[in-house]
Amino acid sequence: MRSCILYVGLLMVLNHISHAQTTLSLEDCYRQAETHSPQAAQMPLIQEATDLQIKLLNRGYMPQSRLNGQATWQSDVTSVPISLPNFEISPPPKDQYKLTLDVTQTIWDGGVTEKQKAAALANQQVEKQRVAVDIYQIREQVSNLFFGAIFAERQLLNFEILQKEVQVKLTKTQASVQNGTAIRSNVLSLEARLLELEQQQLETQKRRAAALEGLSLLTGTAIDLSTSLQPPAATAIAAAVIARPELRLFDVQKQNLAVNEQLIKAKNLPKLSAFATGGYGRPGLNFLATQFKTYFIGGLQLQIPLAHLYTNSQGLEIRQLRVNQQRIERQRESFLLATQIRLASQRQEVSRLQALVESDRKLIEIRGTIRKASESQLENGIITASDYLTELDNEDTSRQNLILHEIQLLQAQNNLRLTAGN
């Protein structure tokens, strides 16, 4: 029984350790958010819709049949105005009936069906790439929440260090008050600073929890306060090659228009088909007959469109497609220019933050030296606790600025990659 209890306890400890050590990188969040995105569910639907469309187009190669029925009455009928001895040609009845089954089999459709299937596949690529562009936009939301959570986490660590520092000074100052070497107001100042730190810590915890909850909703993954976020490594500024999904969208749109141009040409090519008609009616093929008869007609049919030769409709449609291609090319150039401008601005932002981080580190060294001197002065009763807290807050402000600028630098470097599509 005791060994069983120990075993269960060990499992609980291991599970707790495993849970506490859960780490999540920014790339993990990207992948999970893109997979969990409602837009991602459109991909298989687009594929299914295209497959169904191609199946329908393939049905065009099958024989097409139609059943027709007709009953008419006419005011006059064909008659033969010839009178012969002992021979009478009866006119057909004025009420006529016809039931036919028409069957048509395409032999050559000018390549229209094949071009329609190619157009369906090209349109599928356009729709999928539009979804890919929408999904890519999610990365910016994920990035903001991810770095917001890391910033709050580092602030909390800094608050813990600061709390320990103030608590140590409070304990020493309380002892000094009891010994009569310090005044009571010094204790009150330190206690007030501890309360302020607790308030700041609580506010930061709420911000971190909100950011993690947002990440959890975006990624569809359980992310709690025990999850450790792994920030991306700092990277040097490089000449980024733009590889955004929008560029791929422009390319597939132009390809789609090129396929439609081939479809327009195919529609104006000659078409050849075989047809057969079986019927039953009065009259049959002999329009002078007065009895119900069955009949059959079969043959080949050649259709050569000619209207486009004198209306220039084909040329106008193709010209319209090529104008749209030019529009897409101008949109592509405009997007590239806007992206290059944004990249240039982001590179400057990265350089600015790198300079600030270096400056923050030097300032922390100076502030730390001043704070240590004031610490000794406080213990010797030369300055008050308020004076000491002023220097402590100055050092803390420098540390807070360093934390902020380091996270901003990581995010700026990541934004640079996102903007370039790398």
Image (cartoon, helix red, strand yellow):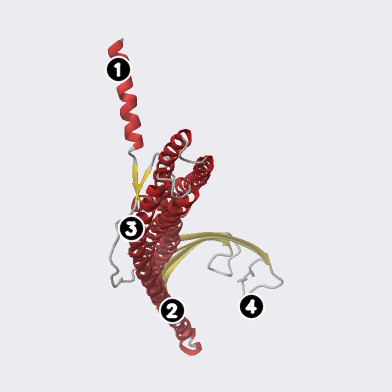
Amino acid type, label 4 = Ser
Q: Earlier in the sequence, mark 3 or mark 1?
A: 1
- Mark 3, mark 1: which one is toward the viewer? 3
Q: Which residue is found at the position 55% from the left and 65% from the top?
A: 284
- Mark 4, mark 2: which one is toward the viewer? 2
Q: Nearer the viewer, residue 341 or 188?
A: 188
Q: Nearer the viewer, residue 403 or 56?
A: 403
Crowding around mark 4 (Cα neighbors within 10 Å: few <14, some 14 to 19, many 20+) is few
Crowding around mark 3 (Cα neighbors within 10 Å: few <14, some 14 to 19, many 20+) is few
Give the number of callouts: 4
Q: Earlier in the sequence, mark 4 or mark 3?
A: 4
Residue at image mark 2: 334
Position of residue 96 measured from the top left corner of the image (x, y, whole percent)? 64, 64
Question: In the orientation shown, which residue stands out farthest toward the front?
Answer: 180
Q: Earlier in the sequence, mark 3 or mark 2?
A: 2
User: How far is disc 3 from disc 2 in space, using C-alphas?
Assistant: 47 Å
- Mark 1, mark 2: which one is toward the viewer? 1
Q: Earlier in the sequence, mark 1 or mark 2?
A: 1
Q: Which residue is found at the position 28% from the left and 70% from the top?
A: 238
Residue at image mark 3: 365
Q: Which residue is found at the position 49% from the left and 90% from the top?
A: 310
Question: Are circles 4 and 2 on residues that touch, CB within 8 Å?
Answer: no
* 20 w.r.t. 77: above or below: above
Residue at image mark 1: 6
